[in-house]
Image (cartoon, helix red, strand yellow):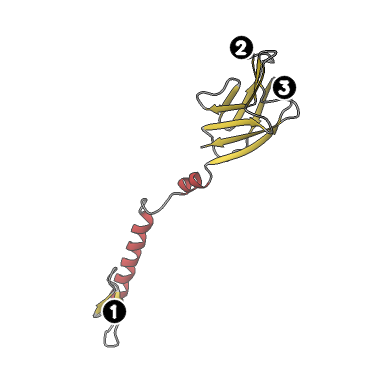
Amino acid sequence: MSSTEKTSFLKLNVWSSTDIPKRVDFNTDNSRIDTAFQEHVDDSEKHVSSSERETWNLPYYVGFYYGDGALQKTINTNCPFEPNFGIIFAGGMPPSVTDFSGKTKYNYFGFLSKRASTSGLTLSGKQITISTSGGAVVNGEYISLNNMGSTYCYLLFR
């Protein structure tokens, strides 16, 4: 015979001293426990997948590179995910500097994405490519994202 009392939620047996337990009672309790755990574990509203957890725990990546003055530079970011958007800037510099006497502007800041980027920047997979022609991009504006000896920071986002 099963127990005279049951737990309130899973209705598991609560034995009193006069109850006579049977194997089927234990098997039924184990089955209820197993079913409850399985339903809980499978509930995607209550649980987060490992890929979702990784996305939430690592939404961005920060890296650095040193300018070498080359007209084209490809940076293997070693980012643990494939970014969708990024920002690059030169350390210790404002986003842009304008020389009014020569009517030139030097850009030390840029945005990049898979589809569109600031002039001279490309994002492909986990690689960033910086291309400068050595001349002005447009109307006296120069890309200054690979100047010899300068330190640059990039922030990549999922």
The residue mark sitting in front, 3 or 1, is: 3
Report if residue 2 is visible in the image. Answer: no
Image quadrant assignment for residue 135: top right
Element at label 3: loop
Choose top left, top right, bottom left or bottom right for residue 26: bottom left
Q: CA distance from mark 2 to mark 3?
A: 22 Å
Q: Which residue was labeled with disc 3?
A: 70
Look at label 2 and name its amino acid.
Asn
Say above or below: 136 vs 27.
above
Residue 38 vertical position relative to residue 84 in the rendered view, above or below = below
Residue 139: assigned label: 2
* Badge 3 amino acid: Ala
Which of 158 and 13 lies nearest the eye of the viewer?
Answer: 158
Q: Nearer the viewer, mark 2 or mark 3?
A: 2
On-image quarter of the N terminus: bottom left
Residue 128 position in % (x across, y down)? 61, 28
Residue at the image point whose x is 72% and y is 25% from the top: 147
Q: Secondary structure at mark 2?
A: loop
Left or right of residue 47, residue 156 in this image: right
Q: Is residue 23 left or right of residue 69?
A: left
Q: Please, what secondary structure does the residue beneath circle 1 have?
A: loop
Mark 3 → mark 1, Cα distance in angstroms? 81 Å
What percent of the width, then of the height, locates residue 10? Answer: 29, 68
Residue indicated by mark 1: 22
Circles 2 and 3: CB atoms closer than 8 Å? no
- Precedes in sequence: disc 1 or disc 2: 1
Q: CA distance from mark 1 to mark 2?
A: 90 Å
Q: Residues within 10 Å of mark 3 (few under 14, many from 20)?
A: some
